[in-house]
Image: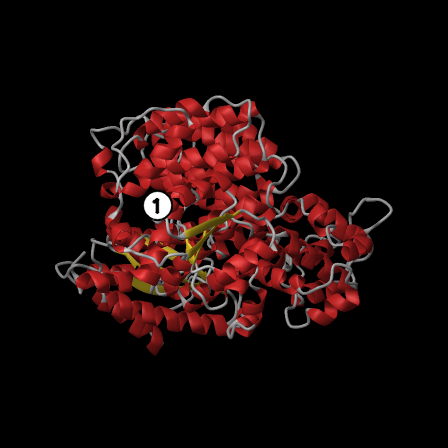
Amino acid sequence: MNSGIPKATWSKFVTAFFSRPNEISATGNEAIERIVTQAEAAWLANPASPFVLPIKASSWTYWYVICPDQGQRLWVRDLIWAYVGSWTDFSGQPVPEDSDLPMDQAVRALTGPKGCSYRLLIPRDANVEARVRQSLVLLTRSLAARPYRRVNLTLPLGRLVGDFWDSCASGAEARSEEILNLLERDQRLSRANKLFLRLQYLAAFEQWDLLKEFDELPDLIRLDRPVLASDALARLAMASLPDTADLTAFMRSTTTFGCLLGSSTMIRSSAGAQYYAYWALSSGEPAEVIVARLLESGWLDQANERSGLATLLSVPDLADRTPTGEPDLAKLQLALDGGRLDAAIDVLALVPPSATLLPVLLELVTKTLNSRSIQLLQRWRKQLGESEIQEILSGRLAASGYQIAIAAEPLGVTLKTAFADDISATERAQAIAELRAQAVPRLMQAGVLREVVDVLRPLSRSVDSFLLTDLIDLLLDMERDLFLAAGDVAGIQDLRLTIVEAWALGDESGDRHRAIRLLDLVGRTLTTGVSPAIFDELVESLRAGWTPFLTDADLSLGLEAIEVLVTVRPDAAVALQVFAAQILGRIGPHNARRIDAVFLETVRILASDFGLELALPPESDGIRPKIALQIRPPKGSFVAIYSLMEPAANRAATIVRRWYPEARVETFTDKVASAALRNAAKQADLLVIADRAAAHAATDALKKARGRKPIHYALGKGSASLVEAVLAGLDAIFGGASHGVEDA
């Protein structure tokens, strides 16, 4: 695997790789010969570096990215996403070790068990193929110019993107924008993917005016987009459409957008469901067919939230939706050209099984992954024979075959299979990736969420401990994505309680990041409202799993947990007293002096609220943080604190008033944009917002009223986070002047 390897080994590999079914020859084409030469140089280097090679099979173009060393896998994966992720079907998973395709066998013979490879399927589009080739040329240069280094202090790209979505789900607009800014500076992401994230950020926080003025909006409309980006555009289109709009008004206002969502399985929001229904109706599809699709996919109620659309969709009954009549291939082509995938499937349902149309059906199944398209494929499979299907699948290198297999199984069955002991790590990773990708459309279907919860309870107790954290992370992602798409749908509370229970009883890793995510989930659970018995059950679960976090370093997380819980504690609930004592009772003379003053003051107030007597040092300037001692705001300085967690805001105000008695400190907890809230935004010297615990409408009003004056955001929901934001804000406004006086 270095310069000592005879060139004969490379020659043997090239001969095998560029043999059938690969329709590309290694010689006779100057561009291909140049690629092969670059690949050979990378392979014979010391150490060997990754390289790329193309194949063409059954008229489909693929590119292999081959890693001589498994240690290069994650680095190369991120670079692929950065350079060509938006143009291919790349899932982030390497080629399975047991693949028997000739090209895969040739690669394994070259690299041995120490290497791996990725396979990228390119859409059948000359422009896309050209762009991918250009991007891969840049990728090849990057691989050659920047040798792999094992030490990488940057956060994994997947973690950053996951944190971005977590912040969106928590309503933390400032934190979401902060992470987005990091992602937009990250060279591992392509320009297109950065645009998609910016689009989804603006849609998540309903910044429609900014999105309409976004210079790249025309590019976003033209690009081949991921589903979430298409749904974000649908939300933009529906935001300016009156609730009573008819088809004429819809068509007039959406001419630039086109068919954003070609299948009901692509819907990711109420607005997306409404756009899908309007567009299908405007294309001449019968209302009863559209209603049946929306009902099957779980989005009918959301579509009917618009009164104008509800009128258009109202039908006397839901008769059998099985298409009838003569097959019309012209209608099929019209549906395909318009991107209406569900309509194309309905046409194919009337057509006798055909080997000629089988690739079209397979493409539709892969893009929609809905039960109707899969059932149609299974019917064609029986009538055409397995060989016809396998020939097409092998032409696509079985990339879609696995997706279809996952979609055809009940979701609960797939979950159990993914965490079984007898599958390989590669198969498990692929299954988990597909479960994440298919979670929202599958969980929205009637009864599926209930089925999943029933499977999870015994599964979380039986799965091996080393797999349990992967299961919990997957479930946290599924709950977050479902909440972002549809809010608090029926059954999501049971899913949340199951996740908390699984974490409490089996996760002993002490992973702080996972605990923070879980606390966000608990917050969503409590916001929806729970009985005293369920509240106590949640608290007991947290207490059972909190042992790794009973440290000074994790005190801030513990305080936030207490404050999140106490804000909504039902009168009859009793378990929180013990949990609070477990966290607060750790603080005493042995560690109080080394705990940050902000947290110590929060502990002091919370202990008093719970009737706990702690041996804490007396209140004095000596325990104030250094930054607080350095800041001297003028008498009468106005500090406004906004949070929906009123007790936390009041505790924060108490601490700030204690440290700055001459300052005016007021708290606001309005869910709507009141006059008092607007006036405070205009007049306050410092405005602090806990956007993780805030109403979106009120936050928007504060920002508008504030104008160009700065706003400071708390990182968390608790009083300590609010006080830290106040100190940072006061330092930014008055700290320079105070420091100057002291220095003089």
For the C terminus, give its image quadrant: bottom left
Answer left or right for 182 relative to 126. Answer: left
Q: Is residue 362 visible?
A: no
Q: Quadrant of residue 136?
A: bottom left
Q: Position of residue 239 (x, y in %)?
A: 65, 62
In the displayed orientation, state which residue is furthest to the left.
Answer: 4
What colouring does the structure picture have?
A: secondary structure
Nearer to us in this view, 646 or 419: 646
Nearer to us in this view, 596 or 463: 596
Q: Which residue is rendered at x = 74% and y = 64% of the image?
A: 331
Q: Which residue is rendered at x = 39% and y = 52% of the image?
A: 663
Identify whether 588 is placed above or below 722: above
Q: Give the residue type at disc 1.
A: Glu
Identify whether 485 is placed above or below 284: above
Q: Which residue is rendered at x = 18% and y = 63% of the image?
A: 743
Q: Which residue is rendered at x = 58% and y = 26% of the image?
A: 531
Nearer to us in this view, 100 or 659: 659
Q: Position of residue 395 (x, y in %)?
A: 49, 57
Count all numbered tags in the image, as a single digit: 1
Q: Identify the element where label 1 is drawn.
A: loop
Q: Position of residue 89 (x, y in %)?
A: 47, 58
Q: Is residue 589 visible?
A: yes
Nearer to us in this view, 335 or 480: 480
Q: Quadrant of residue 541?
A: top left
Q: Residues within 10 Å of mark 1 (few under 14, many from 20)?
A: some
Q: Circle 1 is placed at which residue position? A: 97
Identify whether 182 is placed above or below 506: below
Answer left or right for 317 relative to 222. Answer: right
Q: Position of residue 484 (x, y in %)?
A: 55, 48
